[in-house]
Image (cartoon, rainbow, N blue to C red):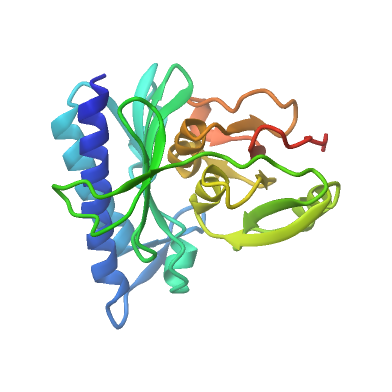
Amino acid sequence: MDHDKLAQVCRRAALQAGAKIMEIYQADDFEVRSKSDDSPVTAADEAADALISEILAEAFPDTLIVTEEQAASHSQSADSFLIVDPLDGTKEFVKRRGEFTVNIAYVENGVPVRGVVYAPAKGRLFYTQADGTSVEETGDLALDTVGPVTPMHVSTPDNDGLIVVASKSHRDQATDDYINKYSVKDMTGAGSSLKFCLVATGEADFYPRLGRTMEWDTAAGHAVLLGAGGQVIRFDDHTPLTYGKPIYENPFFIAYAPGVALKQG
């Protein structure tokens, strides 16, 4: 894979998809339908998916593209693949909370090595550069001109006062029970893959997820966190979370900054 080209194409695709999503988000009304698993889908999900898929297929015609909105892709597999959630956090989108993202990642041999997470309503763009390090880009976020970038690095955690980030839409008692095993100084909620990015920027120390997720939900944020010095492990045995699993379904996991004294569930 040409990582320079990959970084440029994925950044641009995320920005274009984000612009399309915001057109629909800012409309007076939009239709919300339920998929077969009862999760919501909107015209924004579908428009962003079509746009990203076209861009990636043209740039990388020999690479498998797995995307949430194309069920046929969920039965395919390869050692290396692109994986896309065109609108992560549809519930946040529908509730007009603004905490939704465009996620695009590239996986090699089970590891998400490159990724971009774009939160268009918040104007925050996080991605791995060609060398694998993670940055947050600020400024105009123009399609053809890369603005100022700030290197991202995880925090140095204080285990006597950790900052935890957890889901807004998928919080449950099991998650709260696990978090209560730690000395927590502050607790913050965030939607979509922004939780990974808050750990990657050092705004939070760890993010436990005791609920169902799919690989397209996590791969881009996982890549960004890895590029900032963080880790993502399985909740059950604390081994690295890998990709390319059957139907692209994840087990429970913990995303964290090294130095967090992890507890067993």
Q: Is residue 75 above or below residue 184?
A: above
Q: Is residue 264 above or below residue 11?
A: above
Instruction: Report whether 164 appears left or right of 184.
Output: left
Q: Quadrant of the N terminus?
A: top left
Instruction: Report whether 31 appears left or right of 253.
Output: left
Q: Is residue 239 above or below residue 46?
A: above
Q: Quadrant of the C terminus?
A: top right
Where residue 57 sits: x, y (%)?
18, 33
Instruction: Report whether 130 appears left or right of 182.
Output: left
Question: Considering depth in this image, is 209 or 204 the residue closer to the camera?
Answer: 204
Q: Indicate the quadrant where residue 59 lies.
A: top left
Where residue 72 sits: x, y (%)?
34, 36
Q: Indicate the quadrant where residue 123 lies.
A: bottom left
Q: Indicate the quadrant where residue 232 lies.
A: top right
Q: Residue at x 21, y 53 (%)?
A: 16
Q: Is residue 215 above or below residue 4?
A: below
Where residue 52 sits: x, y (%)?
24, 45
